[in-house]
Amino acid sequence: MNRRLFLKQSIAITSVATAVSFGLLTPIKAFANTSEFKELSKKTQRQLSNAQEGEFVLKAPEIAENGAMVPITIDASHMPAVKNIAIYVHNNKVPLSAYFEILEASAFITTRIKMAETSVVTAVVGTASGSFIRNKTVKVTLGGCGG
């Protein structure tokens, strides 16, 4: 490896590490600016705008003591031909909090999401016959997205 290439790479790595350590660059900020994420966000926004009220289970606490780890469970296992499940937190800087492709498996998801503040959480289940939503308001007492 030549010296010039080594110095360029060292400076780049140091710059990124410094930005991450000061909170200027977080993984969600980096991923949210990719074309893949933007396309996924547009796709799920279309699903959200065309969705009907669904008959699936959305479990979330009424009050989350820590917004950094809010447990969410979605059970759409009784629905036929589920393709994907998306979770939106309307008051987050990046509303699309999670997206799951369902590949010939039971449509049962349990995960933890970050919430900056009290917000409506929307689960969107995409099926072969359309999109379905459920909403739940979650009150956050301690912010989890840098708040």
Image: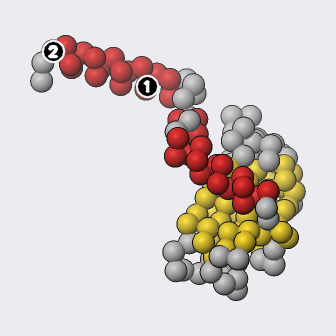
Look at label 1 and name its amino acid.
Val
Marks 1 and 2 in Cβ contact (< 8 Å): no
Mark 1 is surrounded, within 10 Å at the Cα level, by few (under 14), some (14 to 19) or many (20 or more) other residues, namely few
Left or right relative to 63: residue 108: left
Label 2's element? helix
Name which residue lies at 81% across and 74% down: 54
Q: From what the image shows, is residue 120 above or below residue 53?
A: above
Q: Which mark is residue 53?
A: none
Name which residue lies at 33% across and 17% down: 11
Look at label 2 and name its amino acid.
Arg
Instruction: Tell me the quarter of the picture where residue 78 sits.
Output: bottom right
Rendered location of residue 63, percent (x, y): 85, 56
Q: Earlier in the sequence, mark 1 or mark 2?
A: 2
Name which residue lies at 68% across and 69% down: 126
Question: Is residue 38 or residue 21 the one in the foreground?
Answer: 38
The residue that label 1 is drawn on is 16
Which quadrant would the C terminus be assigned to in this image?
Answer: top right
Rendered location of residue 102, percent (x, y): 56, 72
Q: From what the image shows, is residue 43 above or below residue 33?
A: below
Q: From what the image shows, is residue 71 above or below residue 103?
A: above
Label 1's element? helix
The residue that label 2 is drawn on is 3
